[in-house]
Image: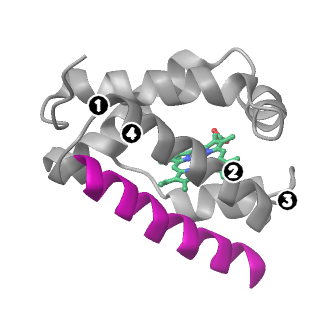
């Protein structure tokens, strides 16, 4: 398969769908997603499409506060460096498997930065 960069909303959907398909069966992350999201993936996935389309395509459609969401989440499930490392590895591997280019790199960089901030906020909350 010839890899191209992330450039459309369809690309974002492919990335998000592929990532969460893997996350659902991941030994460490799967139980977290299944516990919190359960069978409400139809509500979670569109939020994630908007989130990444806002970051990578400048869509400005995402209205939410991921920091607060994950601080709340960390009170219900274990969210330590171990979980964030696993999340980042899975995300980066998925990006690399599907895309190549500037936006693909930006996706990985932004995920790293946001994950670092989240972990920091969680640890000091
Ligand atoms: C250990 C790592 C992570 C786990 C286990 C995790 C898990 C979750 C779960 C279970 C939800 C749904 C929360 C709910 O509906 O109550 C959620 C929402 C979300 N996550 Fe994560 N997450 C992680 C890291 C990240 C990172 C690094 C990012 C960003 C790069 C991110 C972005 C989001 C966004 C945008 C939402 C939607 C928040 C909203 O409702 O507006 N997550 N996450």
Query: Marks 2 and 1, Cα distance to the nearest angstrom?
Result: 21 Å
Which mark is first along the chain, 3 or 1? 1
Q: Residues within 10 Å of mark 4 (few under 14, many from 20)?
A: many
Which mark is first along the chain, 3 or 4? 3
Which residue is disc 3 drawn over? 75
* Mark 2 or 3: the one toward you: 2
Which residue is disc 2 drawn over? 86
45 vs 56, nearest the viewer = 56
Q: Magenta region: which residues? A: 104-125
Which mark is first along the chain, 3 or 2? 3
Q: Quadrant of residue 38?
A: top right
Specify whether residue 30 is painted magenta.
no
Residue, x 67% and y 58% (percent of image)?
84
Query: Marks 4 and 1, Cα distance to the nearest angstrom?
Result: 10 Å
Which residue is disc 4 drawn over? 95
Q: Position of residue 26 (x, y in %)?
A: 74, 31
Which residue is disc 1 drawn over? 12
Query: Marks 2 and 3, Cα distance to the nearest angstrom?
Result: 19 Å
């Amino acid at each position: 398969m010839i890899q191209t960069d992330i450039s459309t909303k369809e690309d974002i959907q492919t990335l998000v769908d592929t990532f969460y398909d893997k996350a659902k069966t991941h030994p460490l992350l799967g139980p977290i997603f299944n516990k919190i999201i359960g069978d409400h993936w139809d509500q979670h996935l569109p939020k994630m499409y908007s989130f990444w389309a806002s970051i990578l395509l400048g869509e400005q459609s995402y209205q939410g506060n991921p920091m607060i969401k994950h601080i709340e989440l960390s009170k219900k499930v274990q969210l330590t460096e171990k979980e964030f490392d696993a999340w980042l590895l899975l995300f980066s591997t998925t990006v690399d498997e599907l895309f190549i280019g500037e936006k693909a790199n930006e996706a990985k960089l932004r995920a790293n930065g946001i994950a670092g901030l989240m972990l920091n906020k969680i640890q000091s909350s």
